[in-house]
């Protein structure tokens, strides 16, 4: 269609004559478009001495293409008829050559062989022997562009519309792109590569073509070689990833699987990925979600440093996203890219992410975490499986959702199978043989295989406790007064096993958390045992227990904490104490009421009620009893509390 528009412009707008229309004057561009040449005798009708009148007959092969009136009367006959008549006749001969091949002479003019039927009438008027009855190029074009006529075809619409794509309205652009999307398989490859594709890329980047135009670009790019793609498409795509338009970004991410294989790892790491990660923090959830999904596409092209550094940092943010769907997709994404993570940090990252998702209130997030754990079990050690993963999965066995309970059972089966397989290859024991153990203290009897397991366990436990009782030697010294009777000493023995008495006459049993570190307690003569100290000492070798793992113990506030505190014990239980008077404990802050009365009586001279003043009796120093448990220090390690 290019030449006809050019001839129309020459005849109508320029008021000139081309005078040399034929196949030899048509050239094709690299994209396959037709271009008009042969302007050797181009002349304006306003010039009386134009070259066409003198040199028109000297053009090569002019005798074959000369209109009948010029062949009869010479080139000056142009002045007698319409100036467009020469080019109209030559354009008709050009159509005959296009559809039939070589043109021999004027006798073939008007033959319709090979000419499309819809064009017959207009074609015959172009080659009419009477120049005044010939159809001008402008009128021929107008007839052809009528609806359903010979120029009303998708190919012609494409070639006409692609140059004007940037100035079309949004509705016209949408309609054009829809037609173009349906014709991509019918057009020459070079035409799309060199003509349509550059125009579409310009429209996407500058002309508002939008995602629709980019979709056509991706369809056309699929036919390009890697070299052509790198030369024509890659630079534009890199610039588009820097475009702040969210619609363009989502379109790029949607089409990323179609073009990721065309990009080198260097291009992805250095130019595309730094632009992609901005979508992880975008305000629009759809951008964040599409960015997250793109990770599965680009991760084969990313370096280990990028994956285990910057990528995991952004995935940690999406794992805590406010959108439950994005949190769920993050868990799925981590499960699928697990093989690409570094060996040193893979287990730590996955366990932290998956166990957190197990507590997600969104049911699909919990289900995704269970499935991801089942799919990535090979990356966890047996210690992590038993100590970290299974304790986190077990609560979901009684989840409110049945789908979660079912998946939790499947996941636990996977890890139990792995743990049992590892346990089957472990030795029965790592203890040294019996003859290598030194007889350094009381020995515990081992459970006998021929007895009940419960009875055997209780038997050796009681035996060990009896050994401890028999190991305690010497007489328990009282801590109250040196003149305590025997019953009182016995009572002291019994009360020594309970904690100190509180102001409400109630006591609590203290929780014992560690074993003794000394075989035999040595009581210092410089202090006495408080009422809560125990005389039972563990004679066995010490063993360490990290109680920090159990959390902070309760301070005895009496609240129900699930078994940490025990019921209080009344001090009235047990045998009666000796009837010997025991001075009541006084606090130094209590007032001396008897001394105050004596002082008042002395001031009045007659004492209370006129009697003689009472002699001042020296008040014995009040005995202060410290009811608080004594704090242990490093210097006084007597094994308190470790016997249990």
Image (cartoon, helix red, strand yellow):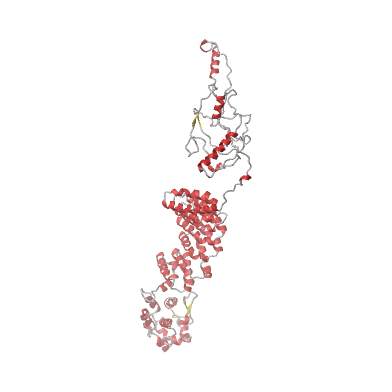
The location of residue 414, given as percent across then percent down, is 49, 54
Q: Pick the residue in front: 55 or 546.
A: 546
Residue positioned 50% across, 70% down in the render = 224
Residue positioned 58% across, 18% down in the render = 618
Q: Pick the residue in front: 503 or 181.
A: 503
Q: Pick the residue in front: 111 or 141.
A: 111
The location of residue 626, given as percent across then percent down, is 56, 28
Q: Quadrant of the N terminus?
A: bottom left
The quadrant in which residue 448 appears is top right
152 left or right of 347 in image: left
- Res 76 visible: yes
- Res 206 visible: no
Q: Quadrant of the C terminus?
A: top right
The quadrant in which residue 266 appears is bottom right
The total number of labels drawn is 0
Q: Please tell me whether residue 457 is drawn above or below residue 202 in the rendered image.
A: above
Q: Pick the residue in front: 553 or 135.
A: 553
The location of residue 268, given as percent across then percent down, is 54, 62
Q: Please tell me whether residue 340 is drawn above or below residue 576 in the rendered image.
A: below
């Amino acid at each position: 269609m290019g030449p006809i528009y050019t001839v129309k412009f020459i005849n109508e707008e320029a008021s000139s004559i081309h005078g040399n229309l034929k196949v030899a004057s048509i050239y094709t561009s690299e994209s396959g478009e037709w271009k008009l040449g042969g302007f050797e005798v181009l002349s304006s009708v306003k010039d009386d001495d134009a070259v066409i009148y003198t040199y028109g007959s000297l053009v090569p092969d002019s005798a074959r293409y000369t209109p009948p009136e010029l062949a009869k009367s010479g080139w000056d006959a142009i002045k007698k008829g319409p100036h467009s008549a020469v080019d109209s006749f030559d354009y008709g001969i050009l159509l005959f050559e296009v559809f039939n091949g070589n043109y021999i002479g004027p006798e073939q003019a008007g033959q319709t062989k090979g000419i499309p039927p819809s064009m017959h009438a207009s074609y015959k008027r172009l080659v009419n022997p009477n120049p005044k009855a010939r159809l001008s190029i402008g009128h021929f074009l107008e007839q052809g562009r009528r609806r359903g006529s010979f120029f009303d075809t998708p190919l012609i619409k494409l070639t006409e519309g692609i140059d004007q794509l940037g100035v079309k309205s949004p509705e016209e652009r949408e309609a054009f792109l829809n037609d173009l999307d349906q014709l991509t398989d019918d057009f020459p490859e070079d035409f799309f590569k060199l003509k349509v594709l550059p125009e579409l890329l310009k429209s996407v980047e500058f002309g508002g073509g939008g995602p629709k135009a980019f979709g056509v670009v991706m369809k056309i790019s699929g036919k390009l070689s890697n070299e052509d793609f790198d030369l024509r498409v890659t630079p534009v795509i890199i610039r588009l990833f820097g475009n702040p338009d969210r619609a363009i970004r989502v379109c790029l991410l949607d089409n990323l699987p179609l073009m990721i294989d065309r990009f080198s790892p260097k291009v992805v790491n250095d130019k595309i990925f730094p632009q992609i990660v901005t979508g992880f923090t975008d305000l629009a959830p759809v951008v964040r979600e599409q960015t997250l999904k793109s990770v599965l596409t680009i991760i084969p092209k990313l370096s280990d440093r990028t994956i285990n550094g910057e990528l995991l940092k952004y995935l940690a943010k999406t794992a805590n996203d406010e959108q439950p769907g994005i949190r769920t997709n993050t868990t799925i994404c981590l499960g699928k890219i697990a093989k690409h993570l570094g060996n040193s940090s893979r287990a730590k990252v996955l366990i932290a992410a998956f166990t957190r998702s197990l507590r997600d209130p969104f049911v699909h997030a919990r289900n995704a975490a269970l499935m991801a754990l089942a799919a990535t079990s090979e990356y966890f050690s047996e210690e992590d499986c038993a100590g970290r993963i299974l304790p986190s999965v077990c609560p979901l066995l009684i989840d409110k959702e049945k789908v979660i309970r079912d998946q939790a059972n499947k996941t636990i089966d996977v890890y139990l199978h792995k743990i049992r397989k590892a346990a089957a290859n472990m030795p029965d024991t790592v203890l040294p043989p019996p003859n290598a153990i030194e007889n350094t203290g009381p020995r515990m009897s081992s459970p006998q295989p021929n007895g009940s397991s419960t009875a055997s366990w209780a038997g050796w436990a009681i035996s060990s406790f009896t050994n401890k009782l028999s190991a305690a030697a010497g007489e328990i010294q009282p801590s109250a007064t040196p003149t305590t009777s025997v019953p009182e000493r016995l009572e002291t023995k019994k009360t020594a096993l309970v904690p100190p008495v509180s102001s409400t006459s109630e006591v609590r049993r203290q929780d014992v958390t560690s074993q003794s570190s000394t075989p035999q307690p040595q009581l210092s003569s410089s202090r006495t045992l408080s009422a809560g100290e125990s005389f039972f000492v563990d004679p066995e070798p010490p063993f360490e227990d990290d109680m920090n793992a159990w959390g902070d113990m309760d301070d005895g506030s009496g609240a129900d904490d699930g078994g940490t505190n025990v019921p209080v014990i009344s001090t009235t239980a047990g045998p009666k104490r000796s009837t010997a008077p025991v001075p009541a404990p006084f606090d130094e802050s209590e007032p001396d009421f008897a001394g105050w009365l004596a002082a008042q009586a002395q001031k009045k001279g007659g004492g209370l009620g006129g009697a003689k003043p009472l002699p001042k009796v020296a008040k014995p120093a009040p005995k202060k009893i410290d009811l608080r448990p004594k704090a242990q220090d490093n210097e006084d390690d007597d094994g308190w509390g470790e016997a249990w």
